[in-house]
Image (tube, rainbow, N blue to C red):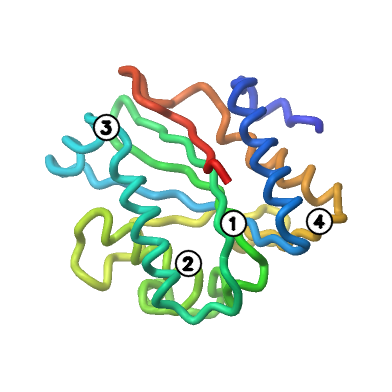
Amino acid sequence: MTLERQQAPLVPRQLRSLQQLLTRAREANGQTLAICFNLHCPTNITVQAMLAQGNGLISLFWKHLYSQFLHSTISVYPDLRFAWCREDDPETGQVTYRVLALLHARAFREAIPVAAEHQDLPQTQSLAGCIVRAWGEALQLPHPPPPQIVSFPIDPSTGQAFEMHLDARDATAWDHLYTFTSALCRNDAKAGHGLRVFQTSMR
């Protein structure tokens, strides 16, 4: 697979983990949905104290997301797999988790609503709605949480939030996904102090 030069410098060990994750997802399901999103961390004292100790917040996020799945109208088991990286802005102290999620393509009727009003997103039954609610619960925010706590990167080819529906037989599409998401493996702007800055799910 070829990497775009503008995404370098990249960490080889993390790239291997990412490719292994994509291989597992491709072999597990004939049809896979891939979406990317950013989890933004408030700069209040409580959240910053948790971030200084490690990555407990994103662990809570996955716990709450699974709970959201249990209470949502889904067609099939989501079979969730993921990769994330943590980025710290040294000037503002802002921490952002950049995430790739891979699910069974038929799990949700709608991934990221196009027509829904932005403020209504946390109240939708879409995958994006589940993500915003789960992150809000991890941050202990009142319901419904403000949708701005999560952002969804725009695909320049469509002008819409990035999502891909991948067929296991379509090697070109999986190569494109690998190239697009390899930015998770960049070694700049990531947290120091011995904290984990990149992880993939074991599945």
Query: Between 165 and 24, which is closer to the camera in this rendering?
Result: 24
| Mark 4: amino acid | Ala
The image position of residue 187, as x and y in percent, is 52, 22
- Choose top left, top right, bottom left or bottom right for residue 144: bottom left
Q: Which residue is mark 1?
A: 35
- Choose top left, top right, bottom left or bottom right for residue 1: top right
Element type at marker 1?
Answer: strand
Image-based side of 77 in relation to 46, left or right:
right
Residue at mark 2 to residue at mark 3: CA–CA distance: 26 Å
Query: Mark 2 or mark 3, which has the lower sequence index?
Result: 3
Q: Nearer the viewer, mark 2 or mark 3?
A: 2
Query: Mark 4 or mark 2, which has the lower sequence index?
Result: 2
Q: Nearer the viewer, mark 4 or mark 1?
A: 4
Query: Between 127 and 70, which is closer to the camera in this rendering?
Result: 70
Label 2 neighbourhood size at 10 Å, few (<14), some (14-19), many (20+)? Answer: many
| Mark 1: amino acid | Ile
| Mark 3: amino acid | Gly
Query: Between 113 and 51, which is closer to the camera in this rendering?
Result: 51
Q: Are marks 3 and 4 in contact (CB under 8 Å)?
A: no
Image-based side of 124 in relation to 110, left or right:
left
Q: Are marks 1 and 2 in contact (CB under 8 Å)?
A: yes
Element type at marker 4?
Answer: loop
The image position of residue 66, as x and y in percent, is 42, 62
Which mark is drawn over residue 128?
Answer: 2
Label 1 neighbourhood size at 10 Å, few (<14), some (14-19), many (20+)? Answer: many
Q: Is residue 179 above or below residue 188?
A: below
Residue at mark 4 to residue at mark 1: CA–CA distance: 16 Å
Element type at marker 3?
Answer: loop
Residue at mark 4 to residue at mark 2: CA–CA distance: 23 Å
Q: Which residue is mark 3?
A: 93
